[in-house]
Amino acid sequence: MKRLVNSLFLFLTLLSILLIAGCSDDDNIDTNNGGEASLTINGEPYYSSVVGDFVMGEFMGSNFIDNLTSDGCYYAYGCFFPANNSELDGYDFNLYFKPIDFSTASKGTILIKCEDNLQKWSAARTESIYLRYFKNVISGNVSFDSYDPEKKLVKLNINNLTFVNDSGTQIVFDGTAYFNDKL
């Protein structure tokens, strides 16, 4: 009898574990980190400010996606700081890409860069009071990961996106970042 009770207890425990694991909401973005990025720049951890900051009619220190171009391209802006400290020098990047329907896109869909000369992908490093620009992408890509329609958050995977400046210095972005969908 004791063996039957132990077997029944083990079966019920395993069943409850399976039910709990099976009820997770895989479609929603996990924003337990406050919607911050989890990426590296040149192998060092960087973070972004919480998405959705909108100050005096402009986005300040936030990550967002919008349709700000006259040619219909989407625009993504990201702002990243080391060790979650916005007092240290950080990086911004600008991505212009062809429209994508986040609500129906498949995970892994590569964002297609707009080819307009004025809409180049770029990055900039804030160094004290001036910006150091990296205006050419030489390798890597950015892909769609997931979309949370309730929070209007887009999660993008940044896959070894390598920028270079005029002097040949490279920076490599790699990881994930969240963007507030302003479309």
Image: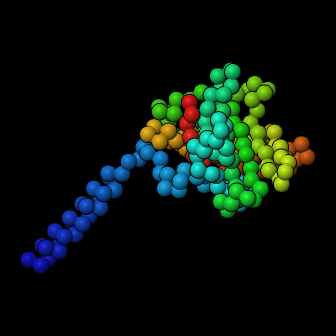
- Measured from the top left, where is residue 53 in percent x and y? 60, 44
Residue 25 versus residue 82: which sits nearer the camera?
A: 82
The number of callouts visible is 0
Name the residue at the front extreme.
Answer: 56
Q: Quick check: 18 left or right of 50?
A: left
- Measured from the top left, where is residue 120 in percent x and y? 76, 32
Identify whether 40 is placed above or below 124. Answer: below
Q: Residue at x 81, y 43 (%)?
A: 134
Name the residue at the right extreme.
Answer: 167
Residue 90 versus residue 43: which sits nearer the camera?
A: 90
Quarter location, residue 97: top right
Q: Quick check: 108 left or right of 83?
A: left
Residue 61 visible in this rendered orientation of the protein: yes
Quarter location, residue 60: top right
Residue 176 visible in this rendered orientation of the protein: no
Q: Residue at x 83, y 46 (%)?
A: 131
Q: Residue at x 84, y 51 (%)?
A: 129
Residue 176 versus residue 48: which sits nearer the camera?
A: 48
- Measured from the top left, where is residue 51 in percent x and y? 58, 46
